[in-house]
Image: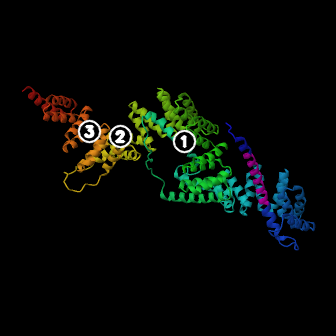
Amino acid sequence: MVFMGDRATLLETGRFVQRHARNAADEIIEAVTAVDAFADTTARTEPDAGPETEAETEAETEGRHRRAAERGDTDAMSALGALLLRRGDLEGAEPFLRAATAEGDRAAANNLGVLLHQRGYPDEAAGWWRVAAVAGSAPAAHALGRHHRERGDEPAAEYWLRQAAEQGHALGAYALAELLEHRSDVGAERWLRAAAEQGHREAAYRLALALERRATEPLRGPHAYGPAAAAGRAGHAYDTAGRLRAADTLRGGERARAVAPRPETGPPRAAEGAAARLLGEAEQWFRQAAARGHRRAALHLGAILEQRGELKEAGRWYLSSAKEGEAKAACALGFLLRDAGDEESAAVWWLRAAQDGDGNAANALGALHAARGEQQTAERWYRAAMDAGDVNGAYNLGLLCAAQDRLPQAEQWYRRAAYAGHREAANALAVLLLQAGDAGGAEPWFSKAAEAGSVDAAFNLGIIHAGRDDDRAALAWYERAAAAGHTEAALQVGIAALRDGDEQTAERHLRCAAGGGSAEAAFRLATVLDARRPEPGPVVLGAPVDQKTECEEWYERAAEQGHRRAQVRVGMLAAGRGDLAEAARWYREAAEAGSRNGAFNLGLLLAREGSEREAALWWTRAARAGHGRAALRLALLAARRGELAEGRSWCARAVELGPAEVAERAARLSEALREELTA
């Protein structure tokens, strides 16, 4: 898909690449020339010429060297040849370089090799490089090493590159490191470091990457920061809400807040310290390379700083990298601006990145327009992301279609993303198939998504197996999801452990789920802790109110989330402390939400305070909802008022509802009322 301005951007990008290639070649030639021609020739200029000064123009320098060369000065011929070579005047440079070479000038021999290589005579160039390298020229050894590597002669290449590197030649050290790295030789890092210490920015960048890899390997997983982490978080920005909606269709409710994964045994502290040191050194090399204009190093540095929360400096490095044409940096900068509330500026950078082919930025633009209700524009950008090779584009198209009830199209896009390996698309596809009644087609996709690491899919598989009464398989999937931090899965594992009598395991999982925001888990955890409490003593009037216990705090957390049984229990605990106002507040909340126990207990408090009429209203509500004790209370009230028929009616309801002791008392009261009625 081509957008307005894409052609101009691509043309400009092409010109930039061409310029970059020319500059790279110039850097190599100039570096070779500068090291030999100037180091070996400027120290021996003609006596009457005087030293070169900054004020001397190139033309004056050329004239001075030319006059000396015409008088047969070897150093001047070498310097003049080098100057003309840098200018690109190969015809003018060659006679001077040949003449100086004939006089044994190693710099001229090296630069003659450069000239011949540029003219397309690599073998003759290699001959002169060998002459200069044997005479001690590090640039010539570097050039000769590269010549042999291009021809596949790695032993010869390594020999000459090592000669250059050991003489302190940065390009030689870097080329040797590349050769060794290609062979997975551990010595590569040493030479990367040598080149980096001499200011080679690509070596500094590659050394930083190597240090980062070494630091993260013992930690069993990819490094938490890096361009993929910073720029890649777009996925959370634009698809998490939709993904959870897709999974929640099966779960039948809003998903609670995410809970942190259960802590696992980590690497030893010594390993962690070593890793931290390596990462710190890697950051310094990224910084050095970025300061020398390396755009990918600037991107990495920005990601590291963003991970640490140093957003202002991170933004500066992202901006530096983005201006140099790094699309991932432009995308990451867009997210920083979005997070800072500047959505319009974010869109500008996302647009720039998306037009340079960054699928992540295209997805972000799609999400931006979708949030604004601009569905067609959102779809266009999601398609652009897909065309850029970002599988999230297809997944987000599926979410977009599902939100519009275009379920056949949603299934099509989910399938496309799922077949490409997108695990959440596989989960969403399975949910869609399950909704359509195709449980057989859904389960393989749930399994594929779960095996790929989808926590939601693992939980949904648990639900499927639980529905078949396959508790063992259900528990295995719940445990897998719980280990990855899934709140509802942790709750299910906790419930299963309680059922099996494993209170310790139950408590651990219930704590995870409760900490993740599950009201039911908080309530069940509170009941576990409550069962361990000693029986409270009698309430003494005027005694200080006891501090709340941990179990009461968990009951309150559940109660504040609207858990009715927890609200009743919090009310009971408050009443036990003598805090009747607090008890009444929680009973009333529970009763108004439909809790029959809350209504009954509220009635008891009101009756105790003399508000028998209001108490009767709440007992009536509780009795009609199936509360036997409330029915018995209403029967007693009616009996005291002399309303014997109504009393017998409530007695019958209490006998029906139970429990046994209530039914027994209600039966005796009913018989007494019958006798009184017939007396």
Residue 556 sits above or below residue 163 on the image: above
Above or below 138: residue 155: above
175 or 545, which lies in front? Answer: 545
Mark 3 or mark 1: which comes first in sequence? 1
Q: What type is the residue that disc 2 sits on? A: Ile
Tell whether label 2 touches label 3 (CB within 8 Å). no
1 or 2: mark nearer the eye: 1
List x then y, in percent, for residue 563: 34, 41
Residue 611 % position (x, y)? 20, 42
Q: CA distance from mark 3 to mark 1?
A: 44 Å
Which residue matches tag 1? 238
Q: Which residue is mark 3?
A: 599
Q: Tell me where the magenta segment starts and ends, as one range.
A: 12-32
Mark identifier at residue 495: 2
Q: Is residue 439 magenta?
A: no
Looking at marks 1 and 2 on the same chain, the residue that comes earlier in the sequence is marked by 1
